[in-house]
Each structure stands twice: as C-alpha cells, then as structure tokens.
Image: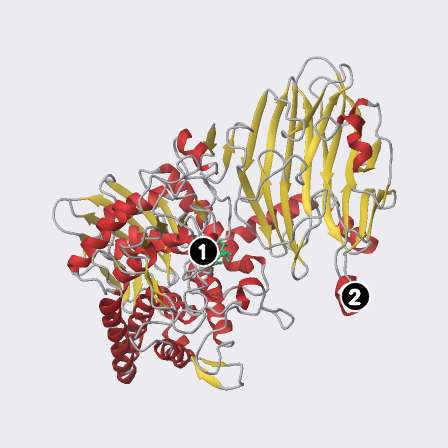
Amino acid sequence: MLSHSRSGDRVTLHSPTAMPQACGLLWNRRMLLHVNCRGFVTAQHMQPEPGKYAHAPFLEARTFMQPEQPLYAQHPGRFLFLRDEATGQAWSLPHEPMRRPVDSFRFEVGQAAIGWVLGVGELEVSLTVSLPVDATAELWTASLRNAGAAARRVSIYPCFSVGYMSWMNQSAAWDEGLLGLVARSVSPYQRLEDYPRIAQLKDWTALLADQRPDSWEARLEAFEGEGGWADPSALARPRLGRGEAHYETPIAALQYALELGAGEARQWRFVFAPARDAGELQQLRARLLAPGAFEREAQASRVYLEGGRGCLRQRSPDAELDAFANHWLPRQVWYHGDTNRLTTNPQTRNYLQDALGMVYVEPARAKQVFRAALSQQHEDGGMPDGVLLSPEAEQQYINQVPHMDHCVWLPVCVAPYLDETGDWAFLREVVTGRDGQGATVFERVCAAMRWLLRHRDARGLSLIAQGDWCDPMNMVGPAGRGVSGWLTIAAAHALRLWVEVARELGEAGVVDELGRGADELAASAQAHLWDGDWFARGISDAGRRFGVAADEEGRIFLNPQSWALLAGIADADQRERIVRAVDAQLDSPWGVMLLAPAFTRMHEHIGRVTQKFPGSAENGSIYNHAAAFWIHALYRAGEGERAWTQLRRMLPGPGADDLIRRGQLPVFIPNYYRGAVHQFPRTAGRSSQMFNTGTASWIYRILVEDLFGLRGSPRGLRVDPALPRSWSEARVERRFRGASFSVTYRRGSGPLAVTLDGVALDEPLVRDVEAGRRYALDVKLPA
Ligand code: CEZ
C-alpha cells in the first residue's frame, strides 16, 4: 500500500481508495498547495491576506485553515480526463470525479513535487505538480506514453476547477494571445473604501498551456451536461464545445486529440495561476513556460528546501523514523519558520515556537523572530496576542481575544537558542520597542517575566482572562478572577529558565528576584492546584476548580502535568502519581490525549473548548503539540522509555492498519489525531490532516536534544542520550555551532562513556567547539 524511496525522501501510496484523505503539501513564500491523492487540491495564496483562485462551485465559507476539511464530489481539483477514441471509454485521472479504477496507481509525494503515475491498459500517464520558488503559480506536467504494440487514438483533457468566483462578476473564455483559458472576476465588496484594496487583488484564474489545444470549454455546466460531474457529457462528443462562461461558473478544460504510435510518448506543460490582469499572465507565461523554465524552477526549489535540512541526520534501527526525521520533519519546521504559516499576524506563541524549530535549522532566522516579537512588546512588559509582520497587518481571528500566556514563550524559546548557538551577546542587543524606548533583549525578557508575576491573583495563581495556550478556554476568567493552573506552572518554568540565563550573565539581582517569583508560583501551585494525583487545570471566575478527580468530564488535563515535570515543581512522589494518572486516563495507541473524558456538553465555567466535538482538537484529541510537551517532559524527567513509546506513536505507520486508521501519509505530523478513544472508538486515531502545528519544532528539538542527547550548553556540547532499549546502536551527523559531529552510539556494559576522536572524556561534554572542525564521538550507552 505504501512504499518509501531508498533515501526516504519520497513516499508512494499505491491506492486511491485505501486512505482517501491522504495528501501531500507543497508551498512557497506566497502560497500553499494541499494535494489529495484522488486529485482534489486546496490552494491558498497571499495577497497579502490569504486568498483563493480555485473555488467551490457555490458561495463558500471563508475561514482560516481548518482541520479535517471535508472533500466533496465537486471539491476543487486538478483532473486529467482520458478518452479512448476507438471505444469511447473515458477515465478521470488520478481518480476523481469519475472514480473509474485504473490498472495501476501511484501517488508520489516528494519534497518539491507531488505526482501520479497511472496505468490505463497499455497507456502510461503521469501528472506532476510543483511550485516556483517566488511566484504564485502551479507548474503542471502531463505525459502520456503508449507502451502497447499498436497505435492508439486518444484525447486528453486537463480539467482544472475554477468554481464560483464572485456574485458580482465572473466569466471565462479562451484567450488565443495568452494560449490559455482565462477566468475573470471581481471580488465582491460593498464599501467604497474597500475599492483600492479590491483593485489590487489577483481576481483572474488562468490555465496557460505550452501547446495549443484542439479544443476547450470554459463553462462548467456545458462540460458536465446531463451526465453530471461524475460522467461529464462533454467527453461523449468528439470535441469540446469551445464555450464561454458569461456570469456562469467557469471551468478550465482543454482537449488534446492525438494519435500515439507504439512506444510513442508526448508531454505537455501547464501553468495554473491567479493574476491581476492580462499583463501579469503574459509575464507568467514568458517566465514559466519558456524552454527549460520548469527545470530551472525545480532546481531553485531544491536549493530552497536545502535551506531547511536541519542540523541532524540519523541512522537508527527504525528506518521509517529515519526517513521522517531526515527529510520530512525538518521540512515541516522550515515551512513554519520560513512562511510564518502564511499569515500576516501569527499568534505570538506560535511565532516564537516556530522560531524554536528554526534554532536547529537556521538560527539566524530564530534570532530575527525574537527581535521582531520583542520590538512589539507592550510598555508594561506584556506581549501582544499576535505579532504584526507588516505595517498594514491587523490582528485577526483569535488575536482579538486576550490570552495571558504569550510572555511564557520567550524564555522557553530563547533559552534553547542560547544553548544551541552560544550567542550570549544577543542578550545585550538593544531592541527598540513600540514606545521608541530601547532596552536589551535580556531586560525585555525580564520585563515579560515581571509581567507574569504581576498578573496573578491573591493566591499567587496566574490570571487567565480569555485564554492561555488553550485558545478556546475563554470562559474561565473573563471577569478577571479566574486562573490557569497550567499557566501558573508554565510561568514557574519560564522564570526558572530565565534564572539560569541570568545566572550565566552574572545578574545576581535578577537571579534572586525571579528565583523567588518562581518559588512562589510553585508554592501556589502546590497549595491550590494539587488534587491528590495530578494538578488541576484552573479555577474559574466563580471559584470552581476544574480538571480534578471530582469532575465527570475533563477530569484530567495533560498540560499542567507535563509542565509540572518540566518546571521541577512535582516532587518524586507526585511525579510517580502524575505518570500513573496520565498512563491510566490519557494514553491511547496513537498518543496521549489532551484531556479526558472529553466534554460532551457546554461547561460555562470553562468555555468554548467544551463545545468542540468530543475527541476533536482541544476537546480531548491526541493534540500533538501537547503530546510533544509531555514527551519532552518525560525525557527531562528521566522517563526515556515511556517518552520513546509516545514519540513513536506520533508517526503514522509503519503497519497498514495504523496507516488506514490515521488516514495520513508519514510526511508530516498533523495537529491532532482524534481522541476520546473510549467515547468514540470508531474515529479514534484519525488524522486532522492539518500541517500547521507547533509540534514540528518540539519534536525536532526532542530528537536532537533528548533522544540523541546532543544538547548545547554554555560550555559546549553535552552528550546525554536516551535511546530506546530496543536499539543496540545508532549513528548521527549533527551540525553544531559551525562544526560537524559524527556520533556513533553503541550499547555497552558500564555507565555512559564518551570518547572524542578516540580519547575518553572525563565528563560527557565537548568543550570549546571550533567552527569548521569535524569531531568524531563514540558513545557507549549504559546496558
Ligand atoms: O489553534 C491553535 C493555536 O494556533 O490552538 C492551540 C494554540 O496553542 C495555538 O496557538 C491550542 O489552543 O478554536 C480555536 O481557536 C483553536 O484554538 C484553533 O484555532 C487551533 C487550531 O487547532 C489550529 O491549529
């Protein structure tokens, strides 16, 4: 059903029906393409806010990216119809909308291209899409080969959805000058003041061809006819009708009729793109359909992706994990860090955590992010809900809801940056804030820590307002009294991390001040949140504790437990109880759930999270971001074996049953798998198919620092691995501060022993790392 290329950089699915939602993703800095194995495609481009150029056939709801987006029969896609002229038989490739089986099917998801190789009798058809690095356009190649002994007469019909563009104005027609089918529209608007913005939008959608087709059709209804989308009538006629759409729903369908001799092959290239006008299309054509252009763009994409290779190459007994960690995970980290998830106003916590991943991929970019975020810090030390990436950007969606946790992520993400790079000078760099005042990075983060300490109640617990890490936890503290158990604990962790940084700088006053603050937070958590076997999630405005044993729903939440381990708040007995409680109540074959039992009705002292469907998203799914915190905490608490079990569960496969249940290819970590495993067992484990998630950064860090234990410190590279017991050996290449380390791990008999270039180290620490040098480390793991 599934196969991997030798190096692991390509995954192939051999069926269009086994995992109908399976998909791959391509992106560049301007757009994102979500390509489903059956031919459906969801595309989004930035102008500068996210927009679409291939729509549903009806007025569609506009929203930000959503998990588990349903695909429907007329979902936008890129299809290639094929008709045998001798028999009249037709197929739609790769699978939709006719769904006629073909003789062989391969959906190939690569790093920079996604495609299909299909066998229809003796005809071999291939379809591939890639993106240019710096333009909004899809580059499609179709090829056809007759592997049989007799000549064949066939027609192929590239047929790309345009859909319902606008209720004000939409049309489509063939354009001989552009050699393409061009659909035009005017984005709907009503307010006069919106006109200048609307006038700038790319409201046209075009399918440009490298060869003149024999015919075309621009009107969806004419293409479908009475046969409907599942058996379009237009395919029954010798030639498409050359129709135009006049305030009718467009389609971009072309026809090439040809005779293919035995062994003969043909190839076509197409550019599918939005544009503002004919001039822009002319330019796209000149640039992207010129001879050799696709090859040049493919090369540029490879170079672009190279930038996101990351600092680790691993070879372990787990080939699937290796493929994922070497190719797919750093690519997902790179996507987040390089594009900011294609939004103009990333949530501050997402922006910072996406930079956390970049610490191991391109640390200079992480530094830029920290600078940019701190330059938008409020005068009182607080952080905004979102970071505006351009002067025109505005806070949208969830960023209009006050969340109290954004400061926490500063130490959580900056401390690993310091560990990785040793760039302590960054802390003395002056960043000008909103008020025009300059303060150093160190001072700004200290101010953010003081903000956290100030925003507490009389018990010393952190106020939650309308949310913390959990976006939809909006009714715990809107009146200004409710507190977050997780945030209290996370603030303690953040402060403790910053105390270590201050200690390194010799800032004794700060060490003292924030150290005391952290201890207070820890004491408050112990006094008011410990529930006997785990920590409570919060206390509402009305004083109601939740996430406690007495609750029927939402009895235990994962995040307070993970962060209590991380912050060192839990004593040995509490740690044991916590681990036992999480194992007993939150564990599942696909990972740990965020909370359980999932809420089945609205709880007005908690809020919107309880209204989400049980087992989806924050309401008790296996929310991978939170599962990653847990894994990281387990590693740091010395629970390596347990951590490994959870880490491995995050990846779909390798068994067919697991792949089918999750429905996702192992080419990215989704933001969640369905949870509520006891309440809704049928859907448990199903992937959200969503590529946007803070998980990627954390898991990358976990592989580098926790599993392989190659972690930076002020004095050099520390070696503290936690390989699973089942591994007797492994090898990695690790880039660190400009040097490269070849590390071999072998199971030994005594305690951990490390040799550097053949010489035993008295402490597992490589000091004074020199850029440009190659180091060979031999690590003997304890039995
Ligand atoms: O968004 C994420 C946020 O991007 O949810 C996380 C949060 O930490 C991330 O910053 C947990 O709440 O209902 C909502 O508003 C949801 O909160 C979503 O928007 C959620 C999605 O799952 C997208 O990843």
Rendered location of residue 274, percent (x, y):
73, 51
Residue at position x 68%, y 53% in the image = 136
Q: At 33% across and 55% down in the image, what residue appears? A: 557
Disc ID at residue 195: 2
Earlier-in-chain disc, 2 versus 1: 2
For the residue pair 515 and 181, the one nearer the viewer reads as: 515
- Quarter-of-image position of residue 279: bottom right
For the C terminus, the quadrant is top left
Q: Secondary structure at mark 1?
A: helix
Nearest to viewer (mark 2 / mark 1): 1
Percent of width and height locating residue 4: 46, 34
- Residue 345 is left or right of residue 489, and the answer is right
Q: Nearer the viewer, residue 195 or 46?
A: 195
Where is residue 375 drawn, in percent x and y?
A: 51, 77
- Check disc 1 and report the residue beneath it: 609
The reply to whether discs 2 and 1 touch (Cβ–Cβ < 8 Å) is no
Q: Quadrant of residue 490?
A: bottom left
Q: Is mark 1 within 8 Å of ligand 1?
A: yes
